[in-house]
Image (spheres, helix red, strand yellow):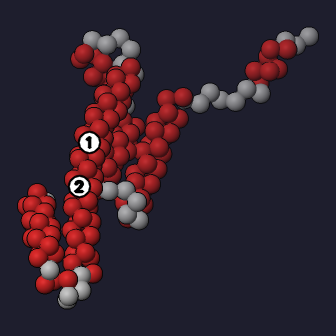
Amino acid sequence: MQDAGAERRHFVLPIVDCMNIAYVFSMTLGLGTAAVILYLLRRDALSVGYSLWWLAVAFGLIGLSLFPFLVDALGRILGIHYPPIILLIIALCVVLIKLLFMDIDRSQQERNIRVLFQRLAILEHALELRSYYCELSPDDTADENTEQKRSQDQGEVEGHQKIG
């Protein structure tokens, strides 16, 4: 009588090296990321500053897939017993740095938007004053009250122009 386990062992596929699959996957992921970033950059959907970050990530993935021993060597140098955790630490640090730069960029954009709104308000006010002057008829210009009003409004326009 034959052993049932021996029959099953006969049909088992050869064991595939999981590490090679991981390296191929990370290489494919890195190349795919680089291709997508270059496509978005070419279509002007992503600015150059942001694309540099993503290209660095893509080339980092490609580099780690080409030289996986670097992670083990760095782990030995730092005294870390499980070297793959270094990848998580590096990834977390990169994400935190990226978030910091995004917050700085957003703060600058908010400041610029606030200044643009203020300038727009000044220009709208100046436009209202200009339309007021255009509505005056020639008969109204002889009136003293109109002249005083005009000089007051002109002073307001000049005051706002100095601010902008």
Of residues 98 and 102, the one nearer the viewer is 102
Of residues 138 and 72, the one nearer the viewer is 138
Q: Position of residue 138 (x, y in %)?
A: 20, 89
User: Which of the 4 image quadrants contains residue 80?
Assistant: top left
Per the rendering, the mark at residue 132 is none
Q: On screen, 122 above or below 89?
A: below
Q: On screen, 25 above or below 48?
A: above
Three-letter residue code for mark 1 = Ser
**The residue tagged with tag 2: helix, strand or loop?**
helix
Q: Is residue 123 visible?
A: yes
Q: Is residue 154 visible?
A: no
Q: On screen, 70 above or below 85?
A: below
**Count the marks: how many?**
2
Of residues 112 and 125, the one nearer the viewer is 125
Is 107 on the left-hand or right-hand side of 25?
A: left
Is 22 on the left-hand or right-hand side of 85?
A: right
User: Which of the 4 image quadrants contains residue 11?
Assistant: top right
Three-letter residue code for mark 2 = Gln
Q: What residue would you read off at disc 1?
A: 107
**The residue tagged with tag 1: helix, strand or loop?**
helix
Q: Position of residue 108 (x, y in %)?
A: 23, 46
Q: Residue at x 27, y 22 (%)?
A: 74
Q: Residue at x 15, y 83 (%)?
A: 141
What separation in Å lies between label 1 and label 2 (alpha carbons)?
17 Å
* Other residues around mark 2 within 10 Å, as few (<14) / some (14–19) / many (≥20): some
**Mark 1 or mark 2, earlier in chain:** 1
Q: On screen, 134 above or below 98?
A: below
Q: Position of residue 1 (x, y in %)?
A: 91, 10
Q: Residue at x 20, y 88 (%)?
A: 139
Q: What residue would you read off at disc 2?
A: 118
